[in-house]
Image (cartoon, helix red, strand yellow):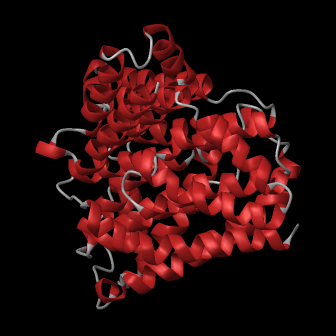
Amino acid sequence: MILATGATWAICAAATAGVIARPFRWPEAIWAVAGAVALLLFGLVTPGDALAAVAKGGDVYLFLIGMMLLSETAREQRLFDWVAATAIGHAGGSPRRLFLLVYATGVVTTTFLSNDATAVVLTPAVYAAARKAKAEPLPLLFACALIANAASFVLPISNPANLVLYGGKMPPLGAWFASFALPSVAAIVVTFFALRHVERARLTGGCEAAVTRDPLSGPGKAALAGIAATALLLLVVSALDRPLGLPTCVAGVATMLGVAALVKRSPVDTLRAVSWSVLPLVAGLFVLVEALDRTGVIAWVADGLRSVAADPVRGAAWSGTILAFASNLMNNLPAGLIASTAVAQAQPPRVIVDALLIGVDLGPNLSITGSLATILWLQAIRREGEDVGFWRFLKVGVATMIPALVAALGVRLLIG
């Protein structure tokens, strides 16, 4: 038993390290899937348990498929170029104003479409804006990455990890706002000023004040309408406390097919352009978590939650902080799954559960592997010829995530 536990931890650690470091420049999915396969080959997880673990992510897979189809459809119809030209026109030649516009747009996108949408839908538009405005792209791209997590607990639909942590049973919107409205504001504002300070040297000078903005085509308008309709649909589905994955997937497929019909083009081209590797990446992570569960990790976490429940305020502070940093070691989706199962066993006070959600949503701003949204963001900027390494992102993450986490947890504890 001890040998099996040690082997499980070693394989999971190696797979996580592979996802972080990407040896040989291989995609992150290869390392996550390789870890899952190794666990199967060594008999550390049964095929049935592995399939059950993969199935747990069903709603997340559908959600991601829908968002990626929306993004690729919009990109093909040059919707991002139109958005970029609009942003530049309002920036008035100021990189700082353009930074503010990008950040505010990221808040809206994350709130109503999820942090993954900010990664896959907004990031290409922002890169296009930077290129057209002849502005330094990295501060604007970092704004996309960080706001995707900082604003991801404004609404229940703002982050798939919210679905995971609450086990699909979300609190009513009134209770949600009571817990997270002010902490969300704190996280968003602190992250903005911290990132602007870190990137201040790149936000000086001027940029193009105006660029030619071609009218949005009919198919482009259809893509925009599809994104707007998806946002409205997600709000309705969330209010009805129903799973978000299938409606998002249906909306993405419908938008893709509708636009393809307008341009009289096969949707196969759109399907080929989507970064499908993110799905096996998520599936592999769920299998790794299942293997860790077999070693008793979740029972140990549940015992820890019971022990800190005697002092809810201090327990919430510690729980949220620990999960925030742990999310960067294994990605916040599996970390949220572990926390969710442990919460179901321990039944801690609500303030501790809320602190865990803040940690699992905001903590991933520390590193590039902390959340699926950041991995999607990396894929998006790589398509545009940009890249950000682990250490470079970590330097920005330390300066922005830690003060934002302190502010959000502090506000949540103050409101009781």
Can residue 143 be seen here? yes
Q: Residue 224, position in %: x, y?
A: 49, 43
Q: Residue 140, position in %: x, y?
A: 37, 69
Q: Residue at x 28, y 69 (%)?
A: 392
Can residue 266 be seen here? no
Residue furthest to the front: 2
Location of residue 324 (image quadrant): bottom right
20 left or right, relative to 367: left
Q: Residue 335, position in %: x, y?
A: 54, 43
37 left or right, relative to 255: left
Q: Residue at x 43, y 86 (%)?
A: 197
In the image, residue 385 sits, relative to residue 340, either above or below, namely below
In the image, residue 407 sits, relative to residue 77, either above or below, namely below
Q: Residue at x 42, y 38 (%)?
A: 218
Residue furthest to the top: 48
In the image, residue 63 sits, relative to residue 96, either above or below, namely above
Q: Residue 306, position in %: x, y?
A: 79, 47
